[in-house]
Structure formats: structure tokens, C-alpha cells
Image (cartoon, rainbow, N blue to C red):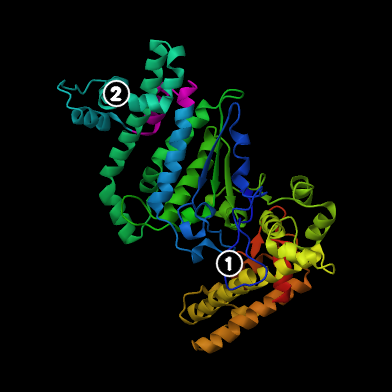
Amino acid sequence: MEDHSKAFTRNNPQQPCPTPPCPSAPHSPWPPWRILGEWNKGPHLTGYVDFAQSIKDQHPNFDGSFPWYSWSSCELPSLSSCQTQLENCLESMAHKGIKLGTISSHQIFTTLNKWHGINTALSRILNQNASKISISNKVSSSGLWDRAVFALSARFNASEIDGVLDFEEKGKSLSIDEASYFKEAIVALRLAKEVIKMQQKWRANAIADLNRSGRFSRSLANSCTDWPCLLLELLSQAAEIGHFQPKLVINNVEILRNAMLTDDSTVCGSVYHDSLIWRIIALGANERSLPVILVTSDSYYSYQAFMDFGFPDIFVSRETFGWTPQEAKMHMVTDYFTHAEWMVIDDVIGPNPRHLFEVYVLKQSNYYQKLMDDEASTFEDIVDAYLAYLQVTVVNPSMDKALSILQKFAIDAQSGKILEHRLHFGAPWRHPPSSKDPTKCKEWAKIQLMDFVQSLVNAEFGVNYLADCSLEILDDPAAVALMEVGLLYAQRDPSFFRPISKGIQRCLARW
């Protein structure tokens, strides 16, 4: 898993100084998808899915900006829109594989037939296509498949298929047999989708009952991820070094866990997310999988997911936390900052990509030019102004949200919703206030948060929870709250519990 801090900042017109950075700054060193073009050259093909893209108020595509704190504070997208994004991306990648001749109709049939009983669905699809030929029960699956592909090819618009395959450009160089081969593969892919969607419709009532009752069924959960997982398997099988090297990048994957369920056509977001991740892991462990890069700033994928999915080594060996100072210097100096400016940035706010982007945009602003007109001003002044901006617009609101989370913890403890083993003797947080009075709960929450932050300051923000045998810190509601709002991050290798950047660390110490 690859882990980066979220990009861009929230625009706040009430903050007069410095001017909030603008996502449309020229020659920006950010966003992270600026290098996708390099990942799609030659044999390389990279699919990019950003589950935050449909959150218009918080996405750069719509002149918004990603929130610093948890996505749970935003209006989350529907699960169906996330599902559509993922499927459309994988389908377009499969079309590229077909155009290169690495995915065939036979391969699609073999992969589909390996996991699904398809005879009944194929028979119904043939009947839907007004086939007057009676279908014998003795016809093999491959025979039904060939008939269904032939029937479906007559139903689809030929120009539509040609458009997918770019035949207008290639037509002159393709023989009739080659063109027929490619068209058959495209129709076969659509047939596979129809088979899976039909089987999912048969389970619609069971899925609706599952959502109402809150129970869990692995088979029903997997049925909702059958199509994207089939595409992933096809792409993985088709991969060939030097010819077709597909990769999938999923940005803001944590949004999928909390996506809103708007109908009963699928399972809830958390179940869909777990099924998808589980099957990607299984594909890599049991068969082979294309590289899947999860981009997130949610530390769940670092210190908790391996327990939930039962794979101790998953996500660890390839986890990175943003840029190292050396990597950031290579990207930033001298294209965006001078060596002297970089020394200040590295010392004060660190190599966090979002900080670098925002300071760079601020450097290009009129505010910076006016500041530099004053002979007594230096680059340090712009960094100090940026820290003040972080304090007022990022850290303080996030700490207020963390306080409300701790306040809720105290109320839940009084209501008996907190497990007893978390409330035994010991740490102060194991003794919540004895009443549900909101004022007392808020005072208690603030004391807990101040005590926790002061302890982190005393430890110089360097807590190695495994080496120090301090796993209990991950049960502390103050620690959980600060991770939920996105100010702290718990990683597994090395097992540090720390602020997400030097800049945030300085603001926490000032709070």
C-alpha cells in the first residue's frame, strides 16, 4: 500500500492571512496524478480511480479542496457512484487489453466459468434475444457461450464496437479474421457483464433482506464485487512484461468504507469495501494480481487492516508515508524552491507533499510579493504565516472535532456502550465523568486531550508503540480521536505513532 497525506486545503474566506492556496496554480508540483501520463507510456497502462471525485465541494476538479481531517466530516458519495467509477475504469483497461490481443473471448469464458455456473443465465440471455432455436439441456457451457456471443453481436451496434476498438484508425491494417477476433472479445466482455448482472438480480431480495437485518453473508457480499474482481483477474492473467503491464491506483480508498447506500441493489459500503480488498488479497495470494496501489491517509490500512483480513504481512512491505526529505528535495529543488528555501521548509514543516504544494502556491501569490517588497521580510516570514494558517484553519477545527468525539466517548461510557475491559483501573480516560452533563463531559474531554497532547510533546512526538510495549495507547480515546480527525497516524513498520507532518506537529504543540 502506498500512503500519502491528502492534497489541497480547504478554502476559508474568513482567514485573512495568508491567502488560501488556489488549486489551479500554474506549474504546480501537485497533484499526485500529474505523473499518470508517465505511467501510461509504452507497455504500461495505469487505471486511476478517485472515490472523492464525486464530492464536488471537496474536490480540485470542481475548484474545491480536499479536507485535512477525516472524510467522515464531508457529505460522502453514494456507493453506486463509487462502484460505477471502479467498474468503468477496469472496463476501459480491459478494452485496452483486448485491442492488444491479450484478452480473448475464450479467456473471458474460462475465467467466468471457473467461478460461476453460467448455463441458466446464458439460456435466458439467448431467449431474450428472440432465438427461435430450442436449447437442449445437453449443450455444453462452451456451446451456450458461443451461441450467446453470436446472438449478442447481432444486437449490438457495429459502429459502437468499432468505436471502442478504434477501428477507424486501425481498420486498414487489420484482416477480416483479426477484426472479427477483436469484435468477438468485446462482445464476450459485455456478455460476461450481463451474466453477472443477471445473477445479481436473482439475489436482489436476499441482499435487501441482508441490508434490513444487518446480518452478514460472504457469498452475497462477493456477488456484489463479482464484476470488478472478474475484470481484475482478466487483466492480471493478460499481463505480459514488455507488452501489457496494467496497474490500478485507487485514491481515497477509505471513502468506499463509508459510502452511502442509496438502494438495495448492493450491500453496504463497509461490506463492499471489505469484500473487494479481501478478493484482491486472495487473487494475489492464490493466483497472480496486477499491482494495486491504495492511496490513503487513513492509518487503518497500516495498523488495523492486517488483523481484520488475517494477513500479517499485507500492506506492510510496500507502505510509504509520503515523501522522504531526500525524495522531496529531488522533486522540489531547484524547480520550485531554492536550496536556502528548502532548508527552511525541511526544518519547519517537513516534506509533506500537501505542505509543499500550499507553500509553493503561497509563494506565487500577491501576498508573498508584497511581503518580499519589505526589505526586512524573509522567506521564513511566509512559512510562519503558513503555520498560522494551518493552526487556525486546520488544527484548531480538527481539535474541536476530536473534543466532540471524546465527549461522545464519555456519554457512551455512562450508557454502557463501552466494553468493560476498556474501563478498568489505570489511565485517567478509564474514569469518565459520573454524570451525563454535557458541560462536565466537555471539560473532561478537554482535560484528556490536553493531557494526551502534553504527553506526546514530552515524548518529543516519538512513540514506538511496539518497541516501547505501548500498544495500550491505541485504545486511548484521545489517540483514536486524533487519528479519526487525521492529525495523527499509526503505522506498522516502523511502528511509530506520530503527527502526519512536522507542520502539524508544531501546531499541536502550540494548541
Q: Which residue is label 2 attached to? A: 153
Magenta segment's dominant SS is helix
Quadrant of the rendering where the C terminus is positioned? bottom right
**Amino acid of disc 2:** Ser
- Observer-nearest of 427 and 325: 325
| Magenta highlight range | 97-116
In the image, taking residue 94 as reference, residue 483 lies left or right, namely right
- Kindly report the distance in space between the C-alpha atoms of the residues bearing marks 1 and 2: 52 Å
| Mark 1 touches mark 2? (CB < 8 Å) | no
> Given the image, on which type of amino acid does mark 1 rest?
Val
Query: Observer-nearest residue: 319 or 221?
Result: 319
Asked whether the viewer can see residue 480, the reply is yes
Mark carried by residue 318: none
Q: Position of residue 272 (x, y in %)?
A: 43, 50
| Residue 357 part of the magenta segment | no
Q: Position of residue 92 (x, y in %)?
A: 45, 34
Q: Nearer the viewer, mark 1 or mark 2?
A: 2
Residue 429 against residue 300 in the figure, above or below: below
Q: Secondary structure beneath disc 1?
A: loop
Expressed as whole percent of the image width and height from the top left, the position of residue 142 reads 32, 21
User: How many other residues sit within 10 Å of disc 1, few (<14), some (14-19) or many (≥20)?
Assistant: many
Q: Which residue is mark 1?
A: 485
What residue lies at 59% left-to-right and 63% top-to-bottom? 68
Q: x, y (%) of residue 91?
A: 43, 35
Q: Residue at x 61, y 79 (%)?
A: 429
Specify whether residue 314 is in view.
Answer: no
Image height check: is 115 above or below 56?
above
* Label 2: few (<14), some (14–19) or many (≥20) C-alpha neighbours in 10 Å: some
Tell me if 327 is positioned left or right of 434 in this view: right
Counting residues from the start of the chain, the first of labels 1 and 2 encountered is 2
Of helix, strand and loop, which one carries label 2?
A: helix
In-image side of 404 versus 488 (left or right): left
